[in-house]
Amino acid sequence: MKNIFYRGLLSLVFTLMLSLPAFSQQKKLKPGDAVPSSVWTIPLEVVNHPEKTLNLSTDKNKLILLDFWNTWCSACLKGFPKMEELQKKFGDKIKILAVSNQDRTTLEKFFATKNGQRFKGMISVTGDKLFHELFPHKGVPYIVWIKDGKLLNTTDGAQVSEKTINEILGGEGSSLQTVVQIGRERPLMLSEDFDREKSLSMVNYSVFAKGRIRGMGFGSGFHREGKVIYGRQFTNLSLLEIFSTIADEIFQKQKESFSEKRRIIEVKNPVPLDYIKNAEGGVEDHNLYSYEYIVPLAKADSLYPLMLKNLSEFANYSTKIEKRRVKCLVLKRTSAVDKLKTKGSEMSFLFSLPKTDVQNTSVYALVNSLNAIPSVPLPIIDETGYTGNIDLKMGVISDIASIRKELSKYDLNLVEAERELNMFVIKDK
């Protein structure tokens, strides 16, 4: 099963919303609202076009799709070839225009790169303020559909297709699902009616849902009071990723290193646990989950065990952290000579395969980094007994033999053994 737990929680990106003085009194538009008349004639700064500006005066009667994007958004770039293909297919019936709030220099520099050269066919508004105020959003890609001079809908990029465009051009009932992007600041799907009730205060909150929430990205967020975390939110992730993230938090609290090597999956069919790819190379929406759990501040220390218990009650799987006798690699000292003690420099930790550089930090951090190496098949545990901070530099490491070679410089070794370890176990109910 492909492990996605260690990829960056992704794909969740945010744009900076800028205001335009000339439109400072213009409220954001909602479906059915007419686009202000001045929008059709205002010169728009663009790149990848023979002229430096253009306007939409000749496109007013077309179906217009504004594709909000930024250079660091991989999902936006992935959608560009589809947008170009649709523009060619429908010709003068539609106008697809990319829109970015990044400045001209940034966009021109991007399109001059090897990666950017692939998308030179996409005309893009640059340094945009106008459309970002009329159609505010929290993340990209974000698509605004305009027809007959009015805002028709707002969606994510995945809903732009030959089918949906034909529906709108043909006057059929649209299958588009409106996307109003949701922030992570408030509890997931909690009505704003709650805020109007002055005598109410949140004590406990939980929501568990299957299927993609199009108004939110793939990722996670926290509810905090100062440094105290009393709530956690996951959106559009696999059950395996949600389970594993919660387990990781519990292991960290116990000062234990967690990785997929400390995870045991005892289910007949593990496929639904993980991400399921669709024909386009993305993930199947129906197998995504969102989960949020909030506890009183007094129970903040128990947040993650309570989350695991609550989620296990309603998911199709039971989960538990239990002792299992397993094979592992034990980190041991081979002499009493202290070659690890830090020289007291500023604390830093660089773990970037194939090298590791640890300064003024702990053996625990070192073990965590070694456990993240995919070529090491067994979990690594610490039995050095070393409690002080360490300095350690390791050269190229690609397998256990090379790791042992680098560790030997510090009188350390990895010894294969069996131990009773806490393991995160996922079972069928």
Image (cartoon, helix red, strand yellow):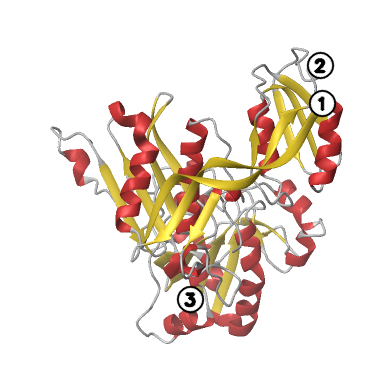
Amino acid type of the residue tagged 2 in the rendering:
Val
Residue at image coords 62%, 84% = 89
Residue 283 versus residue 335: which sits nearer the camera?
Answer: 335
Crowd tier of the residue under label 3, counting other residues whose Cα lies within 10 Å: few below 14, some 14–19, many 20 or above: some
Horizontal side of residue 64 vs 329, given as left or right? left
Amino acid type of the residue tagged 1 in the rendering:
Asp
Horizontal side of residue 405 vs 9, given as left or right? right
Let me know if residue 260 appears in the view. Answer: yes
Crowd tier of the residue under label 2, counting other residues whose Cα lies within 10 Å: few below 14, some 14–19, many 20 or above: few
Residue 348 versus residue 30: which sits nearer the camera?
Answer: 348
**Could you tell me how far apart the alpha carbons at marks 3 and 2 are, in whole angstroms?**
80 Å
The residue indicated by pointer 2 is 337
The residue indicated by pointer 1 is 411
- Of tags 3 and 2, the one toward the viewer is 2
**Could you tell me how far apart the alpha carbons at marks 1 and 3 are, in whole angstroms?**
75 Å
Residue at image coords 81%, 40% = 403
Amino acid type of the residue tagged 3 in the rendering:
Asn
- Of tags 1 and 3, the one toward the viewer is 1
Horizontal side of residue 73 vs 341, given as left or right? left
Instruction: Using the rendered view, name the quadrant where residue 2 is placed.
Output: bottom right
Quadrant assignment for the N terminus: bottom right
Q: Earlier in the sequence, mark 1 or mark 3?
A: 3
**Could you tell me how far apart the alpha carbons at marks 2 and 1 are, in whole angstroms?**
8 Å
Crowd tier of the residue under label 1, counting other residues whose Cα lies within 10 Å: few below 14, some 14–19, many 20 or above: some
Residue 182: % across, % down:
39, 51
Secondary element type, mark 3:
loop
* Dot 2 and dot 1 residues touching (CB under 8 Å): yes
Instruction: Using the rendered view, name the quadrant where residue 29 is placed.
Output: bottom left
Q: Earlier in the sequence, mark 2 or mark 1?
A: 2
The residue indicated by pointer 3 is 61
